[in-house]
Image (spheres, helix red, strand yellow):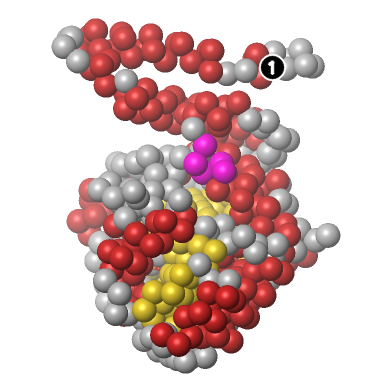
């Protein structure tokens, strides 16, 4: 049975639904499966403002990555779109920009809504990425919600982060200067068929290409125009270069530590949301200090939620 | 009632090039709380089934104006079976002559919602099917 036969696709699809909607208690109680190994599956993130062209770019790049990965496990794309705070519903629109690759048999595309997350990702993203990895994909391309200046979380979810900007994004760039703009590994000035791309590229270079030196990664700034396949080649090469650089210079223990930190932090943040909406009385008729202490106390009761077996694994390791 | 937590694929099989109706229903389903995916125009049954499976949707809505709805429905059902996904429900919408309703329901679709039906009626019918 090959990885992407119809039955496996069905199983993966269902697993991802279950994980995406798991409560905090369900997420921490489940069997974590084999620990993922950094660099086995490359995780490549794409972030940037709404409409910057992330989905279109991913679909063009996916075609190239597939050419390399086909024999080695294929490529998975995860596209996240915002959940409407009013209805709780969403239009998952990333896929429709990916028509040019959607028929490729070794490509798996999955659309997810952001649910309770406000960090550009979605609930349980760590579990979701691990599950996709466990199906043996060689690369995962992750598209965040269209974001503003402050959504840094994707940095810890992926190995290589591509920031997608548009020409004449001058003000946006100023606003991002000390935010997410310094976090990416590769910058794309997308829609370079429009005017202003060269100036925007120069501006971005001025901000991001400061720290040179041995073992340092100098983030490339790549202009990508609609009708220029050679621009996608440049991006494809930059992604490969960065993955090579990472496996050479980055410490996999450190990567796992950062992933773990984000994972635990987001579980706790979401558990706070769960507790506060289940128990509105925690906030009633007391000072902020008392509300805070009550909430912390409510959280510590969570020990009972989790099964004993997970706290004391059979092999005795903690 | 609400469609919160439901995943719905709105698909356009066949050759007609009009998707205003499909988009209206997609937005209405979103406003009722569902996660909605739209395939875009002129997709094969095989492709629609693959997307339904990869996206693990609860139901597929086939929006059809072209007249070959019987054939397309049967084909889509067959492809879903091949993915071990016969349990994914299918409804049809668009311009469906009243005389074909029975046959479509017999073929296994869970609902036939024509363009004349008020939107609220369609939404509550879908909610009933998925609850
Ligand atoms: N001129 C030009 N337009 C582009 C290019 N790439 C994408 N677009 C257009 O930009 C719009 C948004 O593209 P998407 O790929 O959906 O952008 P996105 O960043 O994924 O959008 P969200 O996921 O909604 O945040 C569409 O109308 C595309 O046709 C490009 O290279 N040049
Ligand atoms: Mg997109």
Residue drawn at x 28%, y 68% as measured from the top left? B119
* Residue B53 showing in the rendered view: yes
Mark 1, secondary structure of its residue:
helix
Image: magenta residue range:
A18-22
Q: How many marks?
A: 1
Relative depth, front residue between B121 and A89: B121
Horizontally, is A270 left or right of B117 in the view? right
Locate residue A111, reporting x and y percent. Answer: 49, 58
Q: Residue at x 52, y 58 (%)?
A: B58
In percent of width and height, residue B35 lies at: 41, 56
**Which chain is home to disc 1?**
A
**Depicted A54 relative to depicted A318: above or below:** below
Does the beta carbon at disc 1 come under 8 Å from ligand 2? no
Residue positioned 67% across, 75% down in the render: B78
Tell me which corner region of the image, top left, top right, bottom left or bottom right, holds residue B66: bottom left
Whether residue A204 appears in this view of the structure is no
Given residues A104 and B38, the one toward you in this image is B38
**A13 sits left or right of B34 in the view:** right
Q: Image quadrant for the N terminus of chain A?
A: bottom right
| Secondary structure mainly formed by the magenta segment | helix
Label 1, on which residue?
A309
Is-magenta flag for residue A240? Answer: no
Q: Is residue B62 left or right of residue A91?
A: right
Q: Nearer the viewer, residue A256 or B100?
A: B100
């Amino acid at each position: 049975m090959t990885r992407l036969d119809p039955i496996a696709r069905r199983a993966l699809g269902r697993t991802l639904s279950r994980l995406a909607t798991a409560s905090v208690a369900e997420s921490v109680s489940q069997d974590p499966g084999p620990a993922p190994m950094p660099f086995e599956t490359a995780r490549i993130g794409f972030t940037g403002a709404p409409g910057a062209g992330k989905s279109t770019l991913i679909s063009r790049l996916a075609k190239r990555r597939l050419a390399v990965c086909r024999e080695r496990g294929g490529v998975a794309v995860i596209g996240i779109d915002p959940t409407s705070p009013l209805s709780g519903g969403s239009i998952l629109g990333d896929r429709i920009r990916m028509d040019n690759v959607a028929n490729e048999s070794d490509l798996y595309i999955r659309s997810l809504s952001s649910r309770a997350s406000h960090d550009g990702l979605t609930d349980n993203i760590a579990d979701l990425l691990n599950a996709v990895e466990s199906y043996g994909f060689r690369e995962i391309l992750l598209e965040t919600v269209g974001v503003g200046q402050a959504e840094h979380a994707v940095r810890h979810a992926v190995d290589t982060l591509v920031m997608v900007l548009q020409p004449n994004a001058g003000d946006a760039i100023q606003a991002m200067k000390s935010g997410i703009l310094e976090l990416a590994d590769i910058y794309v000035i997308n829609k370079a068929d429009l005017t202003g791309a060269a100036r925007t590229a120069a501006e971005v270079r001025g901000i991001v290409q400061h720290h040179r030196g041995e073992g340092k990664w100098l983030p490339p700034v790549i202009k990508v125009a609609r009708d220029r396949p050679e621009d996608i080649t440049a991006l494809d090469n930059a992604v490969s270069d960065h993955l090579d650089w990472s496996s050479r210079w980055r410490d996999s223990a450190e990567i796992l530590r950062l992933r773990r930190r984000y994972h635990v932090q987001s579980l706790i943040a979401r558990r706070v949301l769960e507790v506060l909406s289940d128990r509105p009385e925690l906030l009633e008729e007391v000072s902020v200090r008392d509300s805070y202490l009550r909430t912390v106390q409510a959280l510590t009761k969570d020990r009972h939620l989790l099964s004993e077996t997970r706290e004391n694994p059979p092999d005795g390791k903690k | 009632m609400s469609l919160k937590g439901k995943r719905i694929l709105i698909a356009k099989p066949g050759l007609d090039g009009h998707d205003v109706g499909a988009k209206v229903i997609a937005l209405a389903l979103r406003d009722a709380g569902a996660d909605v995916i739209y395939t875009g125009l002129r997709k094969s049954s095989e492709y629609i089934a693959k997307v339904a499976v990869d996206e693990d949707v609860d139901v597929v809505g086939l929006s059809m104006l072209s007249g070959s709805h019987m054939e397309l429905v049967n084909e889509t059902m067959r492809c879903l079976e091949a993915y071990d996904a016969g349990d994914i429900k299918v409804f049809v919408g668009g311009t469906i002559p009243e005389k074909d309703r029975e046959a479509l329901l017999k073929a296994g679709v869970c609902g036939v919602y024509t363009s004349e039906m008020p939107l609220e009626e369609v939404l509550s019918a879908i909610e009933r099917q998925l609850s």
